[in-house]
Amino acid sequence: MTTDEASGGTGSAQSTLTYEQARGELVEVVQRLEAGGTTLEESLALWERGEELARICGERLEGARARLDAVLEAAAGGEGGADEGNGGEGADAPE
């Protein structure tokens, strides 16, 4: 990885990374930082790239969580309607 690659490149390329791509590159960045042997400037560029990749991973995970929550809410809405209907019948039964 060159210093240019470590600094992130273009914003549009970053936004198109999948979670797996961002995580893979983040692992590489961490390995390079842990191995040492880079200049201060290169280390800073790698650190900044790592921060950006971590942010991308977080956004992808948040998006996935939101999609799962939406599916679960939709499924619960179908079941919840049946539960509410049963609760209404139960409330009517004593009368």
Image (cartoon, rainbow, N blue to C red):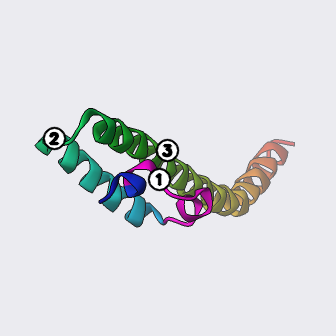
Q: Secondary structure at mark 1?
A: loop
On the image, which quarter does residue 22 sit in?
bottom left
Task: Say the numbered circle drawn on residue 34.
Answer: 2
Q: Which residue is mark 1?
A: 8
Name which of mark 1 and mark 2 comes first in the sequence. 1
At label 1, the amino acid type is: Gly
Q: Residue furthest right?
A: 95
At label 2, the amino acid type is: Glu
Task: Say the numbered circle drawn on residue 55.
Answer: 3
Left or right of 59? Residue 38 is left
The residues tagged by marks 1 and 3 sit, at their Cα atoms, a distance apart of 12 Å
Between 34 and 54, the one lying in front of the other is 34
* Quarter of the picture holding the N terminus: bottom left
Residue at 19% from the left image edge and 49% from the top image edge = 31
In front: label 1 or label 2: 1
- 10 Å neighbourhood of mark 3: few (<14), some, or many (≥20)? few
At label 3, the amino acid type is: Arg
Give yes or no for contact between labels 1 and 2 (Cβ–Cβ under 8 Å): no
Stretch in magenta: 6-17
Residue 56: x and y, percent? 50, 51
| Relative to 46, residue 85 above or below | below
On the image, which quarter does residue 80 sit in?
bottom right
Residue 77: x and y, percent? 72, 57
Residue at 76% from the left image edge and 51% from the top image edge = 84
Based on the picture, tell me whether residue 59 belongs to the magenta stretch.
Answer: no
Name which of mark 1 and mark 3 comes first in the sequence. 1
The residues tagged by marks 1 and 2 sit, at their Cα atoms, a distance apart of 19 Å
Residue 25: x and y, percent? 33, 58
